[in-house]
């Protein structure tokens, strides 16, 4: 307290603090507003299909068909329930990611130290900062002792920066750089202590300003959402026209306009793809759940399908590709160099033991500083003899870093007598100055420092001295230091990153490193992880000189961007998007937030990422593991492939349903389907069957092909043609069953039962054949899919119920079928898809590697 002159400060009074809190509000960044149940319900109901379902249900109520009305309206509420459940599940998971409470702050109030929640800090509060504290607000340092702060969340640099007391003149600037008197909200004190006065809180802090800038960036609807909306609108229009035609034709030809209205609504239900919005909701929600099993939390569900089209992955180096944890990689002493293995040496060579011993003596005990932790960890794991602490030596004084001399020293005193051992570490040139090295030795040291720095290492010089005098000198220069050598430290690459990078390369996903670190360090990391073209770099200052047109040209060939400012990250993402790339951006700091939101897919780190970054991102990595991104991309591709299969299946099955609803009206046949039949098909089998496709595993080559074209429609010409052929094949078969039943004198109820049963079996066969568009049904049965058997069993059981339970049989207007009738239906269903199975065999023999749905 004496060193920081705390006794001269009284701070704010309790009354002043309360008044400021009332005036300025809490020291926090407002979180994204949660959507209410009503808002989610309105969003679901805005879909054209659901509006028509609600309208149809209302008409059925007016006409007195309560059962049909309840089915339709119940369907809407089920979908609302699914959507709401998934939304709340995601929100709850995000809330679990947040800190349970804001960081606590130690302030001076009424002349006393008080610990308060960080959100209650106000402007002009006096903060006492110590090692391990998270700075709660932007502040100016009034006094400090060896204060160092990790500002990587704001600057992207993992090396802590030194702080100096304010001179009363300098105005607050941006974070970054040593010996500045300002600390920033969200940064971490890793060494020393200090007293600071709060200048800004909440949205007015450096962190808050970045968060505020996100409001100007709008989230875009995904191509899939836009395409599905267009398709639903178009089919809704077709359904409306056919519905009107059916009502008019039925009324004119049969004279029963009420029955004509019912027939028209039935046809509209058969034509309109009620399932499309449901399937999209289920796929994306289930996709979000499946991705969460890979430790990736989905913040915005539509981003799930966009993952499969990701072409460029912009990566922030610190904490994303690297561990954000320093480690000793190289030692140099007496002209010899030693590279420390990743797992550490079994036994440190004898000639390097003194170097690492004095390196650790020049560190804080139980350090928070990442470099000190790395040095002490290596020294502790290879201690061959009792250390000074074990021998009773005591650390009695510290000579801190200063702007005049970039080195620090710790003095250790022997248990008896005035014998001192001094260990110093710092910038190599500062250590050379302390040791009074001759020019030749300095040149050799500079050459070695250059080699180590080129390898991406941060280099420290180490020196020792022995001092025998009752009084210690005032300056480090007064000790007789001896140069021991150099220690090279690096922020190690995450072990899983190189393999994940290789998988990205095979998948055609380009990785771009965007970092605030130096080019040499970035290139070294790039070589370690296998990044393409590691020799080409564009720095922040160079980027400033490029106009947008030239940047778009250069950005196609350069994968490393170093010394990049936050606003430049956003510019890079925008430039990539302008080139037509689907961009995913990873990051963990506040400085990444704007780029995270601007990217098609923003991926924030959940372990150490800021609230602002998580709010801006579409996805959150729960384990901060880069390889989880690759797994998410794989799942994104799987989801889109399976979504195409599901949509194709729904489109195909609607053809026979619509055909058998329209043809009897046009040709004056007995009606085959009533609303209850359509409700059975659409409310049970179609959405449930989509769960089967959602659960299908990815194709074998899913990560060995280029990303899909973002402009590739979900319903391309080939897909529509395939669906039509499948649907027309089923329609032809069940129409034949219906006409033959009438031809052989069977009544409408028996003909209806035969036709409906044949359609259900054909429907199940269609599910089986569309599980894979390259493997036959028999081959794909070897791939487990729990949902498949549950849904097939459920459909068969319900079909048996409506055929053989009198009450249900009456509701469906069926007659009882015999075993030979069932065999006819079974054979007809299999026949309806046999041609596609034969086609798959032919295509597989001709092109065995073609596995991608098209």
Image (cartoon, rainbow, N blue to C red):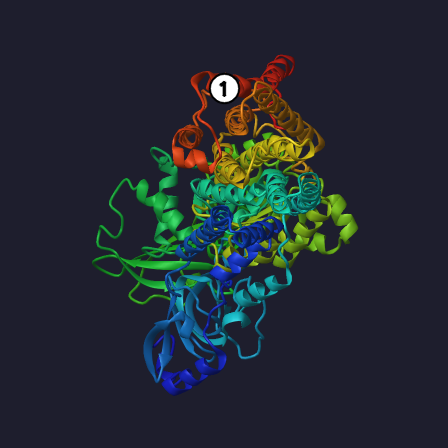
| Residue 214 seen in the figure | yes
Between 476 and 404, the one nearer to me in the picture: 404
**Which residue sits at x=54%, y=44%?**
278
Residue where numbered disc 1 is placed: 826
Between 201 and 57, the one nearer to me in the picture: 57
Image spot of residue 475 (x, y percent): 42, 66
Instruction: Identify whether 638 is placed above or below 467.
Output: above
Between 370 and 361, the one nearer to me in the picture: 370
Q: How many marks?
A: 1
In the picture as drawn, the residue positioned furthest to the front comes out as 255
Specify the quadrant that holds the C terminus. top right
Between 89 and 281, the one nearer to me in the picture: 281
Image spot of residue 265 (x, y percent): 61, 45
Specify the quadrant that holds the N terminus. bottom left
Q: Residues within 10 Å of mark 1 (few under 14, many from 20)?
A: some
Instruction: Identify whether 144 is placed above or below 91.
Output: below
Tell me: 806 left or right of 618. Answer: left
Image spot of residue 16 (x, y percent): 42, 86
Image spot of residue 740 (x, y percent): 59, 19
| Residue 406 seen in the figure | no
Look at the numbered disc 1 and give the secondary structure of its residue: helix
Q: What is the quadrant of residue 345 in the picture?
A: top left
Instruction: Identify whether 450 is placed above or below 408.
Output: above
**Which residue sits at x=47%, y=70%?**
137
**Which residue sits at x=59%, y=34%?**
671
């Amino acid at each position: 307290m004496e060193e920081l002159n705390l006794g001269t400060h009284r701070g704010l009074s309790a009354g002043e603090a309360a008044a400021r809190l009332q005036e300025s509000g809490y020291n926090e960044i407002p979180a994204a507003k949660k959507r209410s149940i009503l808002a989610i319900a309105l969003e679901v109901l805005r879909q054209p299909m659901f509006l028509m379902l609600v309208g149809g249900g209302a008409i059925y109520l007016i006409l007195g068909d309560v059962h049909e009305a309840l089915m339709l309206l119940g369907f809407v509420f089920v979908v609302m329930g699914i959507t709401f459940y998934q939304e709340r599940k995601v929100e709850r998971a995000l809330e679990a990611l947040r800190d349970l409470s804001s960081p606590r702050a130690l302030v001076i109030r009424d002349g006393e130290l008080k610990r308060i929640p960080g959100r209650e800090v106000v402007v002009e509060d006096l903060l006492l900062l110590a090692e391990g504290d998270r700075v709660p607000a932007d502040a100016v340092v009034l006094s400090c002792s060896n204060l160092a702060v990790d500002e990587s969340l704001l600057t992207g640099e993992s090396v802590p920066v030194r702080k100096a007391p304010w001179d009363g003149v300098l105005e607050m600037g941006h974070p970054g750089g040593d010996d500045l008197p300002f600390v920033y909200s969200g940064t971490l004190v890793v060494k020393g202590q200090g007293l600071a006065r709060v200048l800004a809180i909440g949205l007015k802090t450096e962190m808050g300003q970045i968060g505020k800038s996100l409001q100007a960036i709008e989230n875009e609807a995904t191509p899939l959402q836009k395409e599905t909306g267009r398709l639903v609108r178009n089919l809704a229009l077709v359904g409306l026209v056919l519905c009107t035609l059916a009502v008019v034709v039925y009324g004119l030809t049969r004279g029963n306009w009420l029955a004509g209205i019912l027939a028209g609504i039935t046809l509209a239900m058969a034509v309109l793809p009620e399932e499309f919005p449901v399937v999209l909701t289920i796929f994306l929600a289930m996709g979000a759940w499946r991705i969460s099993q890979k430790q990736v939390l989905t913040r915005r569900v539509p981003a799930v399908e966009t993952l499969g089209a990701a072409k460029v992955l912009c990566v922030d180096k610190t904490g994303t590709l690297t561990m954000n944890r320093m480690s000793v990689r190289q030692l140099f002493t007496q002209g010899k160099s030693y590279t420390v293995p990743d797992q550490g040496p079994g036994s440190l060579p004898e000639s390097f033991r003194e170097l690492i011993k004095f390196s650790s003596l020049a560190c804080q005990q139980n350090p928070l500083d990442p470099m000190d932790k790395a040095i002490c960890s290596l020294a502790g794991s290879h201690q061959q003899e009792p250390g000074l602490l074990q021998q009773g030596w005591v650390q009695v004084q510290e000579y801190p870093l200063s702007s005049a001399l970039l080195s620090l020293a710790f003095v250790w005193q022997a248990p008896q007598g005035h014998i001192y051992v001094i260990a110093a570490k710092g910038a190599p040139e500062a250590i050379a100055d302390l040791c009074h090295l001759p020019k030749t030795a300095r040149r050799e040291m500079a050459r070695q420092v250059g080699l180590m720095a080129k390898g991406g290492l941060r280099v420290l010089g180490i020196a020792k001295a022995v001092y025998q005098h009752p009084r210690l000198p005032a300056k480090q220069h007064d000790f007789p230091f001896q140069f021991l050598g150099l220690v090279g430290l690096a922020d190690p690459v995450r072990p899983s990153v190189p393999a994940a990078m290789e998988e990205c390369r095979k998948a055609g996903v380009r990785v771009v490193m965007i970092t605030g670190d130096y080019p040499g360090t970035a290139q070294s990391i790039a070589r370690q992880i296998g990044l393409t073209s590691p020799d080409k770099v564009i720095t922040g200052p160079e980027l400033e000189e490029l106009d947008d047109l030239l940047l778009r040209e250069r950005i196609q060939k350069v994968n490393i961007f170093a010394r990049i400012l936050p606003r430049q990250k956003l510019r890079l993402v925008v430039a990539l998007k302008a080139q037509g790339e689907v961009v995913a951006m990873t990051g963990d700091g506040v400085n990444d937030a704007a780029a995270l939101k601007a990217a098609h897919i923003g991926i924030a780190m959940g372990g150490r990422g800021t609230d602002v970054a998580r709010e801006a991102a579409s996805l959150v990595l729960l384990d901060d593991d880069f390889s989880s991104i690759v797994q998410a991309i794989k799942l994104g591709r799987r989801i889109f492939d399976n979504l195409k299969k599901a949509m194709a299946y729904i489109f195909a099955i609607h053809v026979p349903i619509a055909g058998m609803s329209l043809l009897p009206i046009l040709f004056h046949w007995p009606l085959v389907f009533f609303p209850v039949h359509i409700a059975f098909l659409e409310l049970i089998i179609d959405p449930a069957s989509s769960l089967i496709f959602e659960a299908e595993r990815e194709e074998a080559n899913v990560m060995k092909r280029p990303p899909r074209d973002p402009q590739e429609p979900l319903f391309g010409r080939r897909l529509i043609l395939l669906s039509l052929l499948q649907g027309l094949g089923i329609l032809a078969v069940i129409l034949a069953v219906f006409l033959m039943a009438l031809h052989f004198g069977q009544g409408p109820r028996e003909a209806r039962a035969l036709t409906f049963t044949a359609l259900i079996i054909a429907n199940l066969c269609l599910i089986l054949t569309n599980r894979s568009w390259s493997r036959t049904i028999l081959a794909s049965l070897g791939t487990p899919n729990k949902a498949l058997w549950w849904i097939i069993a459920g459909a068969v059981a319900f079909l048996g119920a409506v055929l053989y339970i009198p009450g249900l049989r009456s509701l469906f207007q069926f007659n009882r079928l015999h075993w030979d009738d069932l065999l006819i239906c079974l054979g007809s269903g299999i026949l309806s898809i046999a041609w596609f199975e034969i086609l798959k065999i032919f295509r597989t023999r001709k092109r065995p590697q073609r596995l991608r749905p098209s």
